[in-house]
Amino acid sequence: SPSKRRSTIMDLLRDRRYETPNNLAALLGITARTIRNDITTLSCTYPFQTIRGRYGGIQVASSITHIVKNLHHNRKFCL
């Protein structure tokens, strides 16, 4: 489901701090376009920085690690 997928994306980005849409897509078995759409949705709630260009990717603010770790399971699932 989209909410489970977004939660997995958040977990990956929390742990890795930075990743490319193509790498995330390969890890999850979905398209990079889906990753970009999910990041757009998640960025309404969480502080992401997207970096454009050849070496671009998705980076999260340091505060996000603490926020996501402390979310109640039900709240995290709603992402």
Image: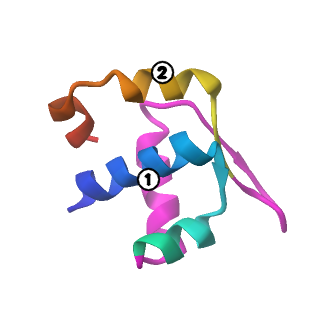
Picture residue at 53% right of the left edge, 72% below the top: 32
The quarter of the rendered structure image containing the C terminus is: top left
- SS of the residue under disc 2: helix
User: Local crowd at mark 1 within 10 Å, few (<14), some, or many (≥20)?
Assistant: many
Picture residue at 26% right of the left edge, 59% below the top: 2
In the picture shown, does residue 47 fall above or below 54?
above
**At which x and y percent is residue 37?**
45, 59
Residue 56 drawn in magenta: yes
Q: Which mark is residue 9?
A: 1
- Residue located beneath label 2 in the image: 66
Picture residue at 56% right of the left edge, 30% below the top: 47
User: As shown in the figure, which amino acid type bears the numbered disc 2?
Assistant: His
Give the magenta-colored segment's residue range: 29-57
Residue 70 drawn in magenta: no
The foreground one among 67 and 3 is: 67
Quadrant of residue 1 within the rendered picture: bottom left
User: As shown in the figure, which amino acid type bears the numbered disc 1?
Assistant: Ile
Point out the residue furthest to the left here. 74
Q: Residues under labels 1 and 2: Cα distance?
A: 16 Å
**At which x and y percent is residue 17?**
64, 42
**At which x and y percent is residue 26?**
52, 77
The foreground one among 2 and 8 is: 8
Task: Give yes or no for contact between labels 1 and 2 (Cβ–Cβ under 8 Å).
Answer: no
Display coloring: rainbow
Picture residue at 25% right of the left edge, 51% below the top: 3
Quadrant of residue 44 within the rendered picture: top left
**At which x and y percent is residue 20?**
66, 62
Point out the residue furthest to the right here. 54
